[in-house]
Amino acid sequence: MAARAAMMRCTILFMDALDPTPDDLLPAPLAQFSARDQIAMAEALDLAAQAIGLTEPNPRVGCVLTAPGGQVIGRGHTREAGGPHAEVVALREARAAGHDLRGATAHVTLEPCSHHGRTPPCADALVEAGLARVVIAALDPNPLVAGRGVRRLHAAGIEVIHGLMAEASRELNIGFFSRMIRGRPWVRMKVAGSLDGRSALPDGRSQWITGAAARADGHAWRRRAGAILTGVGTVLDDDPRLDTRLATDPWGRLPLRVVLDSTLRTPPTARLLDAPGRALLLCRPAALEDEARVAALQREGVEIEAVAPGTDGRPDLAAVLALLGRRGVNELHVEAGARLNGALLAAGQVDELLAYVAPVLLGEGRGLAAFGPPAALDQAWRMALHDVARVGEDVRLIGRPSAVSAP
């Protein structure tokens, strides 16, 4: 019960903090946004969604520039880290087409940055272009921005309003908001099972409970994550690749593959070490003393890092998530066995459940997550359904922790 309450407190506090609006920068009422604003912002959000799988660790941002008469003169979305941001891409497109940017309006899904990082500030680029107005969906939770971009534009005499389709912008960047506000990724746990809640037969065989369409959809969710997490038990039992081969991917960026492996039991021949992309094994500090084992794994190109153990002797889950947050992982996609699933749930570290349910009954078999039963039904884990969809012959459910009701 205590772990369940901790999970809820963490999630509720995060959701309350999703909009980091300073007191002097309140969102504008909907009436202040024109129909043109709404059309342009919807297109900007579509552009931002095209950047899924590309921008990590940066947020997915889209920008649409409109002339004073309302016609679209530039479009863009943020490129890979170190590349141009959405505003700059849109400005370049408009200039290349010979458009006059003076008096134009920028519709941006996230507050323009105001600091020098790997690229110059986007707010300065908008000021230098001579824009008259900037419409923003959501303010940037990054402490280096968080209203400073708006104030920079205001100081240059540009009209700025924000709050249009802010929730959609935050949903698109929920992992970025999580990392900026909580210092850890948004944790999405993927499970697949039968109608009676079984993930495998008693002997562990599970290929395949769900159909091809559900498996391809699961790979699409992998693609949007910065990292995919599993446990060494899954590596030893299933030898997964943990890649995105079934998903349509225009960018070719592969998520980091992370294995919780306390004693470095992952074999150097594991398929996830042979697949393209990077792999990271997280172990207990004592495991690094086996220098021969470490060297054999490192020859396969894997990175190994020690994490302080928790009370169960395994890597502390909160420390694991903090480590991944420091590495710039916005969304963490979990595909693991019942033990790690149960540990994450019991520790209150799951933000979203992505469940595929097949129209099949297995009877006896392995469960989706292993954790202790509640003392009463009103203390059971409950999820508020965020989305329900049919995927091929299966059903996909997306749930998030629901509020804890008073007894």
Image (tube, rainbow, N blue to C red):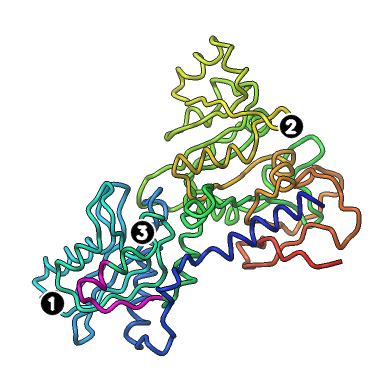
Residue 142 percent location from the top left of the image:
41, 56
Find disc 1 in the rendering and name its residue: 102
Q: Is residue 241 above or below residue 371?
A: above
As helix, strand or loop, the secondary structure at mark 1 comes to loop
Find disc 2 in the rendering and name its residue: 311
Marks 2 and 1 in Cβ contact (< 8 Å): no
The answer to whether any part of residue 396 appears in the image is no
How far is the residue under mark 3 from the one under mark 2?
Answer: 38 Å
Q: Which residue is painted at 47% across and 38% down in the image?
A: 256
Q: Nearer the viewer, residue 178 or 359?
A: 178
Which numbered mark, 2 or 1, is in the foreground of this view?
A: 2
When asked about the image quadrant of residue 334, the answer is top right
Q: Is residue 296 above or below residue 322?
A: above
Which numbered mark, 1 or 3, is in the foreground of this view?
A: 3
Residue 244 in magenta stretch: no
Q: Nearer the viewer, residue 364 or 51?
A: 51
As helix, strand or loop, the secondary structure at mark 3 comes to loop
As helix, strand or loop, the secondary structure at mark 2 comes to loop
Tell me where the magenta segment starts and ends, as one range: 152-162
When asked about the image quadrant of residue 156, the answer is bottom left
Q: State which tag comes first along the sequence, 3 or 2.
A: 3
Q: Amino acid at mark 1?
A: Arg
Q: State which tag comes first along the sequence, 2 or 1.
A: 1
Residue 35 percent location from the top left of the image:
35, 88
